[in-house]
Amino acid sequence: MLYFVVDAFASKKFRGNPAGVCVLPKQLDDGVLQGVAAENNLATTAFITKNGYNYNIRWFTPMCEVNLCGHATLASAYVILNYLDTKSKRVEFHSKSGILKVENKDGVYEMNLPAGDPVKIDRTLEMQRAVNARVNEAYASKSLMLVLENEEAVQNLNPNMDLIASFQDYAGVIVTAKGEEVDFVSRFFCPNNGIGEDYVTGSAHTILTPYWAGVLCKDTLTAKQLSKRGGMLYCENLGSRVKVGGRAQIYLKGEIIL
C-alpha cells in the first residue's frame, strides 16, 4: 500500500505533528491495521479508502484505535489533494465521528469537526499534582481541560505522567492559557494511548475553541501548541462544529509491503 508521512500543522519540515497516512487498496483486518500503526510508531496512522467520490478514514495509535484524530485527518487531506485527487480543493471523510470535511484554502487545510462541550467541574488537588502547576479552572469533555495562569506556566509545565494516566475517564489532559502573541496556547498529554505528549492535537482544539471563543468573545482564533516541535492552528467557533486549520509538509512517500 502507498504510505506517506506528513508533518501536520507545520510550515516547515520537522515541526508540527508527523502522521502516517496509508492508502488501502482494499479493507484489511483490524489486527493488520493495528500492527502497521505499531510498526510505524507515530502518534497516529490514518488508513484511508476510496468511497465513491469521498473517502473512509480510521485512525490508530501504536496501542489502539481512536474515534477522532485531527492532525492525521489534516495529513490525509494533504495526501489526497496533492497526490491522489490533485484537481480537487476539498475532500469529505466518512468516519466514526461522522462526516468530516477538509478544504485547502491557499495552503491552509481547514477541517470542519464536531465541537466538544467543555463543562466546568471542581478543581482537585490531584489535578494540580498531575500537572505540577496551579490550576485556575477545570473542564470535563472527551478530555480533561485544565486552565493555567499564563503562557509561561503552560510552556514550562513538568507533568506527572503516572498521575495523568490515572484519569481513566478521559482521552487525555489538555493544559491551556491565554496566549501572548496568539489568542491561546496549549499542550496535550495522553499516556494511556501510548503517546505521552502529543506534539499538535487537532481534536483537542474542538474543545479549546468553544471555550476560548466564549472567554475572549470572538469566534475566529489563533492558537499555538507549545510542545517540543510546536504548531500553529487557525480556529473558528461555529456552535456545534468548529473549524481547525493548519499547514502541512510532506516528509516521506513510499510503500508498505504486507
Image (cartoon, rainbow, N blue to C red):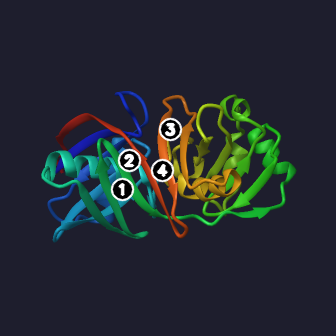
Q: Which of the two discs, 2 and 4, labels the residue nearer the N terminus?
A: 2
Q: Which residue in the protein does label 1 denote? A: 34
Disc 2 or disc 3, which is closer to the eye? 3
Q: Alpha-carbon distance for marks 2 and 4?
A: 21 Å
Quick one: SS at disc 4? Answer: loop
SS label for mark 3: loop
Mark 3: give few (<14), some (14-19) or many (20+) Cα within 10 Å: many
Tag in front: 4 or 3: 4
Please state which amino acid type lies under the numbered disc 4.
Answer: Gly
Q: Position of residue 223 (x, y in %)?
A: 55, 41
97 relative to 23 in the view: left or right: right
- Say the numbered circle drawn on residue 202: 4
Disc assigned to residue 18: none
Q: Give me the disc on residue 199.
A: 3
Label 3, label 1: how far apart the Cα atoms are: 21 Å
Mark 4 → mark 3, Cα distance in angstroms: 10 Å
Crowding around mark 2 (Cα neighbors within 10 Å: few <14, some 14 to 19, many 20+) is: some
User: What residue is shown with label 2?
Assistant: 38
Q: Quadrant of residue 108?
A: top left
* SS at mark 1 in the image: helix
